[in-house]
Amino acid sequence: MRLFFALILAALLLPAVSGEDHTVLVSQSADGSSYYFEPEVLNIEVGDNVTFVWLNGSHNVVQSSDSASNVYLAGGFSSGVPQVGGNWSLPSDYTSQDSTLYYICEPHATMQMKGSIIVGTGEVPLPEISMEFGNFPWLSYLLVFPLIGALWTFGFRDSPHAPRIIALFTTLFTLIISFIVFFKTGSKSGYSLMEEYVWAPNFGISLLLGVDGLSSPMVLLTGIIGPLTVIFAWHEKEKPALFFALLLVMQTALFGVFITLDYFVFYVFWEIVLIPMFFLIAIWGGENRRYASIKFFIYTFTASVIMLVGFMALYFETGAETFSMIEIAKQNGNFSESFQIWVFAALFIGFAVKIPSVPWHTWLPDAHVEAPTAGSILLAGVMLKMGLYGLIRAALPVAPLGAEYFVPVMVVLAIVSILYGAALSLGQTDLKKLVAYSSVSHMGVALLGVATMTELGLAGAVFMMFAHGILSPAMFMVAGVLLHQVGTRDIPKLGGLAKHQPNTAGVFVVIFMGSLGLPGMAVFVAELSVFIAFFESHGYWLILPIFGMVLTAGYHLWALQRAIFGEDSEQIDIKNVHEAPWYEMYPMFAIIVLAVLFGIFPHYLMDPITVACYDILNFMGVA
Amino acid sequence: MDSSSLFLPEILLIASIMAIPALHIFTENRRSYSICSNVSLVGAFIFLVLSWYYPDSLSMDRDVSTYIFYDHFKVDAFSQLFKIVFVLTALIVSLVSTSYFDESEPHQPEYFTLLLSSTLGMMVTASANDFLTLFVGIEISAFSSYAMVAFRKKDDKSTEAGAKYLLIGAFSSALTLYGISLIYAITGFLTFDGVNSFMDGINNGVVDGDFSEVIFISCLFIMAGLGFKIAVVPFHAWAPDVYEGAPTPVTTLLAAASKAMGFVAVFRVFVFALDSVYEEWELILGIIALASMTVGNLAAISQNDIGRMLAYSSIAQAGYIMIAIPALTSEAMSGAIAHTLVHAFMKGGAFVVVGCVGAVGLGYSLDSYKGLAKRSQLLALAMTVCLLSLVGIPPFAGFISKFFLFYGTLKAGMAGNSWLIILVIGGVLNSALSLYYYLKIMRYMYLYDPEGSEDIEFPNTVRYISLGVILLLAVFFPLYWESLFELCKEASAALMG
Amino acid sequence: MIEPINFMIFSSILLLIGAYGVIRNKNSIVVLMSVEIMLTAANVNFIAFSSYYNDLTGQIVALFITTIAAAEVAIGLAILLSLFKQRDTIELDLLDRLRW
């Protein structure tokens, strides 16, 4: 039996090792007037062997970058110092895939002693991306259902109950679809469930939908946050129909951002996200809502038009009349370094405002503080992820050299965001503002992961996006509950809540622990991966972000200690504080379950993410 | 049919122009005047659309221009497209005017006559094939609009706006005319084709002599004159005053159609007749474009009167359109044509709402827009769509046309004319800047409570029109933008010969 | 025969006189008159080069311009008249209901 297997194995291996042998003569004419390789151009198949044989003269064989170059290509093959007579075999690694190898004789390169070997087709094969078109339009359903729900709520705009029931129904339905999408994508490499609807053939714009391991966690996140937002806003009294309709439109736009693979459509969805968010803040916001909503809109819009210029520059540079991200990324080898640097700068500004990274973060605290809780949940939970998602999906694959150029900038911005966000959080008394600044700090960690440009770092960043995407909504829910049940979210005014609402306070504690990165919960996994990756790439600079984590633990625990425990506060009506109602408890509880689940079994998420990150690094030529 | 039947839309308008004063002799019923004007405009519109889709039956060829009246009148895709816009805008204005002016308003027959003759002038401009016809067309339209702006003789704002518009307009047309006379002096031609081939001759060395200074000066004069019509910096000072002072339906016509007519003239002169000497004028136009968008947006921020704010926004929009002209590629031009078209509808739509809010007695300051959403969801929505469209936020029509515009210009910029990239980046940053004051109006409409009563009846005509504008800008153009682009491409191909 | 350049110089002097009149004058009627001078400047060019090129187009244009100028003055005077009825003045500096 063992022999049988050995035979089969040998039979399989045989074709691989028995490549044809070729000989290249290394020689010069007797009078020294010409130096040559014979044959000068050699066509061989993949797996063939090549041997160089010295006839006369003192020569060597070294690889050069192209037919015009006269110098040794660092890291290429070399037969060593010039020798007289003898022979040398080309290592088989070099003939194991399609490529064109140029080589020279170093002493005589300027006398045109050059040659080349064309292996197979001579073209270096592009990394294969599997593009699997689905037979059922799951992704279109993700886009269409919330929209239908939004129109539907408008049909019942006079009823007090119908809008929220419709919204809950719609979001639960999309949650199911997003679970299906997540599991159908699995940890396959490449894009799945693809769909294409041509929109403007003249410009090469089509609604190209597809998910990979990078977008499927984001789709899942958007799906999860949807019903939680609706349940949490169950008792919205003011214009409920419009409120829920905007939430649903927002969900469509967010799904659109995460599943589209076309730069133009990506931009369209990216901008559409702004409109419902603007109205959510502007109509249902706090006292200063007018200022906050306009600031939010102008900051992000300015950044995104710069991003649009970057997209268009990419489109023209490619010259293939297509906005498809896949097609453009395939061409990244043709982009010059300076072009990549400019494009990456334009895209980075667009994305960094959304992340938000210091120094473009100032819109975030204002928007968060003024937004209604449901708006904050969507803003912190999903919208902030658009920035990093866009950076990884739309900027890294097309401009690897630009990204490399900006690594120091990204690292500095990330570390400053971590430290500055954490330091400002320490000083906040408004719980919502505290969470807003902690978002800046957490997203800084994710940006740091991207800046390492390693598989682990990227995966950690994406995991952080997911983990923060479920835990920061929970933090905002805590703030919302405090405002509803206690009447304030000002930390110094609170105190002693644990005695009067023990269950609610318990939930609060767990959420705070999760957010500060307690081992066993999702944020910890992400932080650990990012820090390991950062240590590998930048060494002991790790001390700075670690210090940021100490501050993070500090402000979480301090806030917890002041608000939940301690003496009964005099400034609030502590006797009348009750447990939070079901529609506020269930969403928080659901989030805790998820955070623990992904903290203990991170591989459910990590596997698809890692595969997708590997693909992206492959595109960039880094992996 | 004879190809001179292509003049039929204009003939319909002329007939109506003569019929309305005649009607006035027989009847005092003001409905009859507006019906007469609407019928002729609808007739012209139908005829234009038919001539677009069934060109064969009119011995017209969509791919080549048809010339009538001894080559002075040119009918091609470009002219037809813009005539459709002019007629449509005039129709909207005519419909709105009926509800804007009440029974007691005097001189209504004259008003409709002037409206139609202004439209006629625009249509003649669109079809002009020589400088004289162009000039006469512009003047027909301009004289009628001077009178329309000053139409309310008892309202001193209206008369004052009319006087200012007249004096500046007369000055500017004198400048244009002098520029044209210089062109005639150099070339001996007045037809666009003649001038175009002469200028080509200069480039090819067929024509001897160095005319670059004279050409530069005449371009400067012509641009100064036409710059008044399209209201670009530094020839923009009249626009805010006139937009504020004129009766709002007239403002609608000026902002939507008259501005488009100015652009038609600019396109015909610079992109067709003078395109081979672009080195003389490209820098002037580029600077004007950059200056008008920046000045327009900055000035708009601090305005308190909605008419003035929209006037400054018009100046900025004219700046965006201008960036495509130095690019001189077919893509950039189709972008410019698309944005001119869409601009007519979004500005027109915005002014329809403004006129309606003013007509019911709420006033024209920004404060009167407080809580508009509570008074009428539809009008607030129409205004929002128009404003978001003006900013260029997807998926509204303004985004699409602006995208064409920047797309074409950026493409030309990356293909070699690299200073165009600066114009595009300036345009993009300006769009972001403009967001501020558009959002201010939206904020007033949605976030504040109305001052005074919430129950105000808005006329039905305006509601239907605003519904139409919403559908056009938010549904029709975004869904069928490929066909919009096809139309504009055809028009730009016809324009550039 | 007079060289065409002399006509050009003459017409540009006329134009400058007209433009100066438009810019410096406070009286609307004088501004209208100055505009007429500017139109005349263009007319001079047209007629001179019409005879230089032996081409009738220029002269036809001149006729058109004369007509247009007449129409312009008619409308202009009408508007200024109604302005005068309201304000008892047609001084440009006093037109300040709308900011310039």
Image (tube, coloured by chain):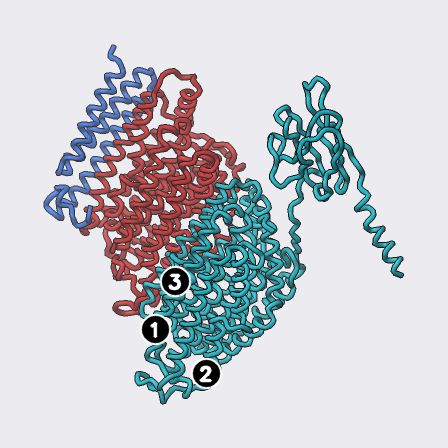
Which residue has dot 2 on it?
A: A504
Q: Residue B116, percent across and down?
A: 34, 44
Q: Are marks 1 and 2 on the same chain?
A: yes
Task: Please tell me which residue lies in front, B353 or A240.
Answer: A240
The mark nearer the N terminus, 1 or 2, is 1
Q: Position of residue B423 (x, y in %)?
A: 38, 41
**Residue C17 found in image quarter:** top left
Label 1: which secondary element: loop
Q: Which residue is mark 3?
A: A420
Outermost residue, top side: C1
Mark 1 chain: A
Chain shown in cyan: A
To which chain does the residue with label 2 belong?
A
Is residue A108 or residue B423 the one in the foreground?
A: A108
Which tint was used for chain C? blue
Circle 3: residue type: Tyr
**Residue count near mark 2 (Cα–Cα under 10 Å), binned few <14, some 14–19, many ≥20:** many
Q: Amino acid at mark 1?
A: Thr
